[in-house]
Image (cartoon, rainbow, N blue to C red):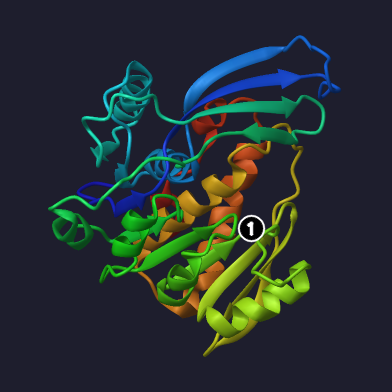
Amino acid sequence: MTGHIPGRVLCVGLATLDVLHRVPDFPAPNRKVTATRQDVAAGGPACNAAVTAAATGSAVTLLTALGDHPLARLIRQELAGFGITVRDCTPDRQLPPAVSAITVHERTGDRNIVSTDAGGVSARPPADLSALLAAADVVLIDGHHPDLAGAAVRASAPVVFDAGRYRPHHDELLAAADVVICSGDYRLPGQDGRADTLAALRGIVRTGAMTAGGEPIVYWDQGLGTGEVAVPRVPVRDTLGAGDALHGAFASSVAERGWVAAELAEHLAWAAGVASVRVRYPGPRDWLRHVPRVTEKRQ
């Protein structure tokens, strides 16, 4: 598309170094298993969403906390290869970034993850945060690094909140974000089941959605009502980062087209299509060769 100006996505949140192993079976306690594949890649919800948004054609900035440890440099180097601008709120930090140990079941695509996430890292908003927010067409926050998320959710651009696991500071984010996309495992305090959480969220979140793996995405808007978006049926080989891919694709779609609540289902359907590409391919990056460009939505 000649002369096309890509949408600008600002992703705010966690970046980790992921060490991934594909295994024929998850090991039992005190047992070892030989992996059939090993990968090392940048990870974390906001980081994975940034990679997806960049792969689909958006101009992406990632606001996160990395530091100057050699492992942090690996993350920064990989993201630069995707054309992602990294803004580091902790440039002088010498400790290693969070390292996620990930095991993916070869046959089912299910995964286990162990990570420190953003624990123990104090990331303060940069002095030029207002300029970063003003330059974005859409802001995506993953709720990690609470001070960053709390500041970014006040952006004038549409704010999309990736709600994965509840934390107390989410109360502010749920109420303030323009769109909240929750995992099917997301639970509010005092809510045991998906249906109860979904009902409670509809009273808090003005526009939102809840995913459920390969099942339809439930969405709602307090002014427009509720609905469902079908998820493409595809062979599943790796579920790691599928939700992150959906969030990044959703943000890319909004950045390209603009945000109107009435188009929520359209944005979700395109994002679900991108996530369905992700789960078809093993490993953290193989699928990017097959991802659609956001400009193809208009063709």
Name the residue at 29% across, 54% down. Answer: 7
Observer-nearest of 22 and 256: 22
Q: Position of residue 271 (x, y in %)?
A: 54, 54
Q: Is residue 113 above or below residue 30?
A: below
- Where the C terminus falls, by quadrant? bottom left
Report which quarter residue 80 is drawn in: top left
Name the residue at 64% across, 45% down. Answer: 276
Name the residue at 63% across, 28% down. Answer: 102
Q: Is residue 159 above or below residue 88?
A: below
Q: Is residue 103 above or below residue 90?
A: above
Name the residue at 24% across, 53% down. Answer: 125
Q: Position of residue 73 (x, y in %)?
A: 31, 21
Give the side of residue 81 with respect to residue 236, left or right.
left
Give the side of residue 276 with respect to residue 192, left or right.
left
- Per the image, the residue denoted by label 1 is 183
Observer-nearest of 272 and 212: 212
Q: Position of residue 59 (x, y in %)?
A: 28, 45
Report which quarter residue 139 is drawn in: bottom left
